[in-house]
Image: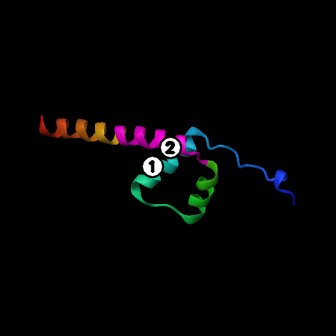
């Protein structure tokens, strides 16, 4: 098979990126899912989703603490 015939896998959808990042936050990943994500996710997708996920987590914790302490 010539090298020019190799097709790139489809780019991951935003939902797939969010799912991969959320599972990564918990540290729970199946090897098959990791390998699939490794070929379909791009670095900018992962960075943006990670930043958004971290912001949502931090804001959720702040809201939860304020609700509990009020």
Residue 9, horizontal then vertical, whole percent:
71, 49
Main SS category, magenta section: helix
Q: Is residue 46 magenta?
A: yes
Disc 1 is placed on an element classified as: helix
Front-most of residues 26 and 39: 39
Residue at numbered disc 1 = 22
* Residue 30 image label: none
Q: Which residues are magenta?
A: 41-55
Quadrant of the snapshot with the C terminus:
top left
Gap in angstroms between the C-alphas marked 1 and 2: 6 Å
Picture quarter containing residue 3? bottom right
Q: Residues within 10 Å of mark 1 (few under 14, many from 20)?
A: some
Residue 30, horizontal then vertical, whole percent:
53, 63
Residue at numbered disc 2 = 18
Q: Are marks 1 and 2 in contact (CB under 8 Å)?
A: yes
Residue reaching furthest bottom?
Answer: 31
Q: Residues within 10 Å of mark 2 (few under 14, many from 20)?
A: some
Quadrant of the snapshot with the N terminus:
bottom right
Q: Residue at x 47, y 42 (%)?
A: 47
Disc 2 is placed on an element classified as: helix
């Amino acid at each position: 098979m010539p090298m020019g015939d190799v097709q790139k896998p489809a780019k991951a959808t935003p939902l797939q990126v969010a799912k991969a990042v959320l599972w990564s936050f918990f540290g729970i990943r199946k090897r098959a899912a990791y390998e699939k994500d490794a070929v379909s996710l791009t670095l900018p997708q992962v960075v943006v989703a990670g930043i958004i996920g971290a912001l949502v987590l931090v804001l959720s914790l702040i809201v939860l603490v304020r609700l509990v302490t009020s």
